[in-house]
Amino acid sequence: MVIIPPTRTTGSSPNPNGPKSGVPAATPRSSDQSSSEQSKRKQAGLLDKKALELENEFKIKHFGVMGVLAWILLLHVAGIYLFTKGFLLTRMVLENKSSCDVLPFEDILAQPHTTALGSKQEKGCWHEKTFDKAVVIIIDALRYDFTVPFAPKGESDIVHLFHNNIPVLYETAVQSPANAFLLPFIADPPTTTLNRLKGLTTGTLPTFLDAGSNFAGTAIDEDNLVAQLHSAGKNLVHLGDDTWQALFPGYFDTNLTHAYDSFNVWDLHTVDNGVTEHLFPLLQPENSKKWDVIFGHYLGVDHAGHRYGPNHAAMASKLQEMDRVIRNIIAALDDKTLLVIMGDHGMDIKGDHGGESDDEVEAALWMYSKRGIFGRTSKDTLLPPQFARDRFVPQIDLVPTLSLLLGMPIPFNNLGSPIEEAFSGARGNNWANLATVNRLTAAQVKKYQHQYALARGAGDDEESTLLWTAAEEEWKSASKGFSSKSTAARASNELYRKYQRHTLDICRGLWARFDVPSMIQGVLILLTSIVLLIIYARGLKTDRTQLTSRLLEFASVGAGVGAVTGFAFGLTGLTEMSMVDGAVLLAAAGSILGATSVLVKKPANLTLPLPNGMWGWLAFFFTVSQSIGFASNSYTIWEDEILLFFLTTFGVCAGVSSMRQKQTTDRILGVYHSILFVILGRIASFSRLCREEQMPFCRSTYYASSTSSTSAPWQLAIPFLVTLFLPSVVRSFYAGSKSYEGAASLWIGFAFRFGLCVTSLFWVLEGADDGEWLPVSNETLKFVRVFLAQLVLALAFAIGTAAYLYSKPCVSINVSKPNEDPNSPPAPIVAGQQQSPRTTVTILGFGNVYGTHFCFLLINFALAIILMQKPMGQGAIALLLWQILSLLEILDTNSLTMTNSSIGPVILGVLGSFYYFKTGHQATLSSIQWETAFIPLTTVQYPWSPLLVILNTFGAQILAAIAVPLTVLWKRPLQTHDRVPASNPNKNPATRILSDVVQAAGTHILYLATINLATTMWAGHLRRHLMLYRIFSPRFMMGSVVLAVVDVVLMVVAVGGVRWNTLTVAEIFGW
Amino acid sequence: MPDTSSALGPSPSTPQALDEKPSAPPVNILPSLIARSYSIAHPALLLALVATRFEALVADPTKELLSTLPWLTLIQIFYVIVCLPPAGSSPPTETSASSPTDGKSSPRPSGAGGAARHGKHAKRKQHSNIWACIWSRSLPALLSLSLTFALATPALTILLVLFGAPLTTHNSETVLCAAHMAVLSATALIYAHGVDRAVWNEVWGISRPADAVWGSALGTGLGAWFGAIPIPLDWDRPWQAFPITILAGAYIGYAVGSLLSRTPLVYGKRVKFTSEDLSETEKKTN
């Protein structure tokens, strides 16, 4: 909005907030007619040469700066890797397998009554088998309270849609207890299907390292039930969830097996219909010879939970469908076949799972047989318990139970115990049998423990040895009376049981063992990288770009030397660390040393990086106080509210500071935007998704209700409101500096609005699909939706990037001669000497030439991120964009853009974190909205699906990170080499921009890296805390992922984008 | 609110120099013995009020806040009438003109205003003086009260909500908390400064020179800000309920600010935001 004298008139640099609009400016270069042609050409040649030099210098330094950011990213990755390796629990995998021929007792090598292998197969290996065949059905996420009649937990508890819809399990267990029993079935967290299947087949405990591999399962190499069945020559059939195929490749009959994609949670029926379709033919008598064990895995209940939440009609009808399926299976079952129905985990009130809350771990287990062999040892246990916590079995208990019932050896790693109901006989008093199976199981557990202790290089646990000896003595003294099925065996049964549970406890403790040295190494690398970043971002007086080449050189030399040394140490075996770890550690350390030597080489260039003035202290205070707060579970739980508190505090301080401004326009604009900033933040705070620990002080508004994961119909209006208002809002920020010119009006006024409009349509169709409002098939709707979503993404990323790369700055240049244009407003006095007649150049939008162009990039990503959010989250992201723009105005009116204040990048970091929570996320695993991977896709596709989930999950942080360069570019006055003071003629103004941008980026990273270091250290320090896996560990993981994502986005998109911003501006206005 | 303790660095400027500025000198406690001693006792009295009523406050915040509000208002009114010069009574020019004669040794309150000028029948006059003086002060006191409730309370309510106070529940607590904070902070400010635009601009800019009035107002705000910190902790204490800690913080902040700002080290100094502010003040004072 400001005029320029385009050449060499440095005396009257105009004020960006001064005269309002199109004032004619001084001479353009071409009208300089007084100079002679030749000298002009010469000068132009020189200028071109100079410009070319400056451009090349800028491009080279830009690469260098990106290299520095890449180095910082690598340091972070190295630190996080080393810490994670020590922190996430690991367990040694023993490759031993149990064998049919070898009983687990040390003294008995072969069973006395065996004669030949054939007869053993016939009668059962270690124990006489009860069933020849089995149908094992997993109903994914079958929570225990779905299966029992509704029993209120409190006075306000009412019947929900998920209650009382699958009564068959309870009915049979009550009406014919000898044929069926129903028990709560408690999962060991993490409650992801992959981990649960491992537990359900190996009988051992999961460790945390497994949790991340849900997107790509890997084969189980431990001894397990499926492998035992396979090696015994049983013909196994698998139907449903394809996770089984990843875990047990090659074990199933390829002709009869049918696997289905498991991650398309929008699809409730394909998997279930497929299982049912292929299951029932196999149950027909004529097909009974074709198979021995069928594993069926239904996913509909789980998907209904993910998509709608448990309290939804879709869940009710899904459960009713399962009820019918089970009744049909019962009808088709023969006498020799065991039927097992179970859930692998439960679901939380939103229908998600992965964590360790009660609702997530409480699944159901039901076994059925037409033979009537199940018993209850006491009257108390006759009925299935009302609540899951009353009486339950751990999920690993399935492994010995199923193994012994089918006459298989117990898998080598098993830690579970046989389920009482299955072995106590129809009258519930077969203590001899119970004692026998418990002795077998205990012996196998003992064998495994012994091997594990050997592998660890440690001795056997004394207390368990004592327990075992006591049980054995009791067994020997009582074994004479066993034949009479009396209660004589009861005592030894109890003792073996005690031994098993004691060992389980020991293992839980053992596998919660952290590798503390590795954790400390990781923390040290993160810490030193922060110290370096503080020096680089806040403690340098010179242009950062000048250091780049030497910095990178020394850092890479250091890294190379370190890596080689690390490998060498690993090879020679001087350290206990593995080669990779040693190389990573020493490479990181070496590069840190190298970089330090460069950074501190000239102490004259360094300043003490202490916070400066109120803003610096405020930024410091926000970062540090939040980091300290993560030591407390309360502040971690209530992070969203604390961030709102911080943002409002910033807004109030900005208002106060604006009141101190000398210029009236600055004061009014500043106060207006401060108030706006605060109010927008508070409005956004109404979008909440409460985590379990926030109850009852929190009410979720993100979805239709607290037990749903779909949007309410009124929330579908939000995308339309965003379509209507957001482009106008963005436009108003452009119009403030008269920059709504050129590509801006087309891109913001049309393309952005169009994209938002299509997004709204998408979500209406989504709602229509959920609510079945339209008489169109789901497939058609899905097809149209996918098309719309891909259209928006293409608009945002393909066309948007092209528009960013090739569009001119948002200025409008009018060349006019005053005397030829009498209608134009009277020209005020123009800077410089007035020589008439002169051509005047009017440049609109000049005051914000960098910012408005770079903002395109922000808008592109905002569009894509808005598409990826649920309707409520779209409103939140729109508010975020508005708040970012408002923040930029605050920074400008308080003269914080050109002074490299730390507050802008830090507040952007706080905004990113705040809106993470406002887009329906929490620092918990179960709040990840996996289903958003299917917004523009129908199937899982790598690498797009994970990228889409990242775009949904960290959309707010990504948007904030892209806005970081704007904190120094917004309303930045144009600087070309001929406009800088003569005192520093060799200086390239473009590298000054680069230096400022990388300083802002460094400060932004500094905020996130400090948060990450704090959460990392606290998680490591509080590793024995009761709340580790519920609170500290997920927050640590979130902090690490956010840091890595933001590092990448800052490097590639934000700082990368500055290249084209500067080039575009320089193309028009020169270097 | 910022970490002012750091920003409130020792200023190189002298307080006397600031007094010469036309708009807003720091407000002095009236020099009478009663005024000086009560102004010390007043913060202690308020703290004692909080301490004695704390259990009742925890038990039923709304009821207790409502029932103590009139008492708080009375105490504050008494305080401003006894201890502070009302707005307009000692406009800056008058203060600077009269301060040499009027100073701290003067036996009569400087804020006695026009009534003090007819000094012939000294004894009788002095008696009627007191009443006239009280009358001349109760009017601004009433005015400040009405503005406190009409403007400051809604403004602080909105501010509390913006800082995260619940909007759909706890409305009475929020409003009453804001009313208490308003009576603590705004009454004295309005009483001492009226609606002087220059002063209020300084108030919004947190750039008033420190004195008992401004110090207590700023202290109230900062105290309330810090009072929010213990709320999320999982100590399961009843006093962690929403307005209680904020209010306690506001009272403590009031007392600390009121007393601290009178000490010679702080008195007359201004909160600095940036180093520029500092240099600008230097320029002006030189």
Image: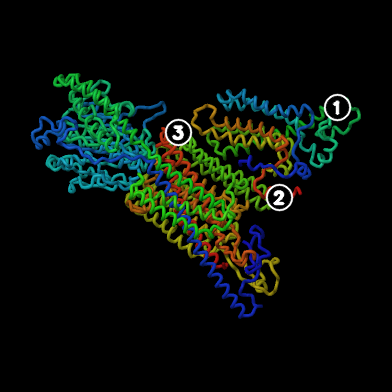
- Identify which amino acid the numbered label 1 is placed on: Gln
The reply to whether label 3 and label 2 mark residues of one chain is no
At which x and y percent is residue B198? 73, 44
- Judging from the image, mark 1 belongs to the subunit labelled B
Chain of the residue under label 3? A
The one nearer the camera, B157 or B20, is B20
Sequence-wise, which precedes: disc 1 or disc 2?
1
**How far is disc 1 from disc 3 in space, using C-alphas?**
65 Å
> Is disc 1 in the same subunit as disc 2?
yes
Q: Secondary structure at mark 3?
A: loop
Name the residue that disc number 3 marks.
A695
Question: Residue at (60%, 30%) from the top-left corner?
Answer: B248
Label number found at residue B126: 1
The tag on residue B280 is 2
For the N terminus of chain A, which image quadrant? Answer: bottom right
Q: Is residue A502 above or below residue A944?
A: above
